[in-house]
Image (spheres, rainbow, N blue to C red):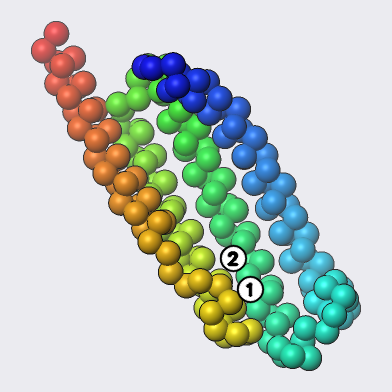
Amino acid sequence: MNRTSARALAVSRPVIQGLTVLNLIYLGCLAALLSASFLMNGWPERALGFDLVAKYPQASYGLRGIVMVGIASAVIVHTVLRRLLAIVDTVRNGDPFILANVRRLDWIAWSVVALEVLRLIVAAIAAAVWEPGRIEAFSFAPWLAVLLLFVLSGVFARGARMRADLEGTV
């Protein structure tokens, strides 16, 4: 392992842990916002400081829907961060090519698919409630990331099989 990789690995655990804490705070804030939206009279006008509903009558429903999608996204991100931390720990322990990491990478890939679908749902809500085109509906980068994650999962699966074969011959 070169020095850059070793440094990146050394900081990855605290960075992932920090992101996990920030994501949990984000999740808590979204849950509080959703609760407040049902309890506050005149929501969202009072919270925003201007009358959004006069121009867009379905705005309150759209905003609640987007907050619910945000909550679902935060839960998915939390599971991704937990699995990523487990992968980092196996790399730090010198044993990354295990079937558990293959499953973790597959799960992370499917999670990225789910996050992208949720992003498309937000774009659809925004188009239905406000004006079409306010939120971009499609991006290639997340789909390329999904492809990369599935390929990486295949590499890890191959490495795990090779390791098992090597252990069987010794």
For the point 58% across and 77% down, which residue is it?
134
For the point 44% across and 16% down, which residue is it?
3
* Quadrant in the rendering for residue 31: bottom right
Question: Which numbered disc covers residue 10?
Answer: none
Q: Is residue 120 left or right of residue 60?
A: left
The residue pinned by badge 2 equals 69
* Quadrant in the rendering for residue 94: top left
Q: What amino acid is at disc 2? A: Val
Identify whether 60 is placed above or below 78. below
Tell me the quarter of the image containing the N terminus. Answer: top left
Tell me the quarter of the image containing the C terminus. Answer: top left
For the point 38% across and 61% down, which residue is it?
140
Q: Position of residue 125 (x, y in %)?
A: 57, 78
Q: Position of residue 159 (x, y in %)?
A: 23, 28
Q: What amino acid is at disc 1? A: Gly
| Near-viewer residue (145 or 63) | 145
Whether the residues at callouts 1 and 2 have beta carbons within 8 Å, the answer is yes
Q: Is residue 127 left or right of residue 39?
A: left
| Near-viewer residue (115 or 139) | 139
Q: Is residue 81 left or right of residue 39?
A: left
Residue 139 visible, this angle: yes
Q: CA distance from mark 1 to mark 2?
A: 6 Å
Q: Mark 1: few, some, or many residues within 10 Å (few <14, many ≥20)?
A: some
Q: Position of residue 104 (x, y in %)?
A: 39, 39
SS at mark 1 in the image: helix
Identify whether 135 is placed above or below 58. above
Residue 43 visible, this angle: no
Identify whether 168 is placed above or below 130. above
SS at mark 2 in the image: helix
The residue pinned by badge 1 equals 65
Q: Residue furthest top?
A: 170
Q: Position of residue 122 (x, y in %)?
A: 56, 71
